[in-house]
Amino acid sequence: MKAPFSICSFSACRSIATKNSRCKKHQREQTKEISRSSTTSNNNIYNSSKWRNLRTRKAHLNPLCEECLTYNVIRPLDVIDHIQEIEDYPELAYTYSNLKSLCHSCHNNKTAKAKTARTKTVTASDMFKQIQGRK
């Protein structure tokens, strides 16, 4: 018996998926994305034994989501996150005090806020407020 057909998982694509839930066109794009991301300097950090040991230590000492705990919610950690992002502060990559145990939900929220902050356009009014020392 043949497996049922499925639709490509790429956003807004309605082609029939052939392998790994993607159509032929988007399988190539997925391969490009993977090869691009694997060359980043962050992967050098995350693949190092120094990072794995630090991550294990943090997870052992803080096994619950630290953000959820501030709201008296108990969730296990899923991600050890850099408070100050590696892209901005690579010198803090292995600094224990720059790490936070987070669940997926809290990590996704933090990442979305950081992404929005990076792409926020600065208006003349914002610049004027910064010069005056206001937020």
Image (cartoon, helix red, strand yellow):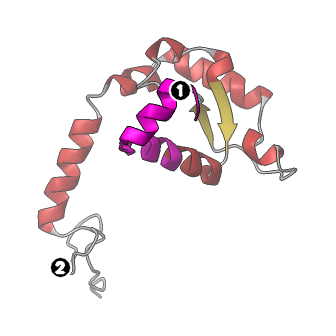
Image: magenta residue range: 112-135
Prevailing secondary structure of the magenta residues: helix
Query: The disc labelled 2 sits on which kind of residue?
Result: Ser
SS at mark 2 in the image: loop
Answer above or below: position of 104 versus 45.
below
Counting from the top left corner in percent of width and height, residue 28 is at: 14, 55
At a point 18% along the width and 62% down the height, the residue shown is 26
Query: The disc labelled 1 sits on which kind of residue?
Result: Gln
- In the displayed orientation, state which residue is furthest to the right: 72
Q: Are marks 1 and 2 in contact (CB under 8 Å)?
A: no
Q: Mark 1 and mark 2: span between their CA atoms?
A: 55 Å
Q: What residue did someone put label 1 on?
A: 132
Image quadrant occupied by the N terminus: bottom left
Q: Give the camera-side residue of 81 and 53.
A: 81
Q: What residue did someone put label 2 on?
A: 15
SS at mark 1 in the image: helix
Q: Tell me: 112 left or right of 39.
A: right
Q: Residues within 10 Å of mark 1 (few under 14, many from 20)?
A: few
Image quadrant occupied by the C terminus: top right
Q: Tell me: 40 left or right of 68.
A: left
- Reply yes or no: does residue 125 show up in magenta: yes
Which quadrant holds residue 120? top left
Number of marks in picture: 2
Which quadrant holds residue 97? top right
Q: Give the camera-side residue of 106 and 80.
A: 106
Counting from the top left corner in percent of width and height, residue 60 is at: 76, 28
Does residue 31 appear in this view?
Answer: yes
Question: Which is nearer the N-term, disc 1 or disc 2?
Answer: 2
At a point 27% along the width and 67% down the height, the residue shown is 10
Q: Nearer the viewer, mark 1 or mark 2?
A: 1
Counting from the top left corner in percent of width and height, residue 113 is at: 52, 47
At a point 57% along the width and 44% down the height, the residue shown is 110
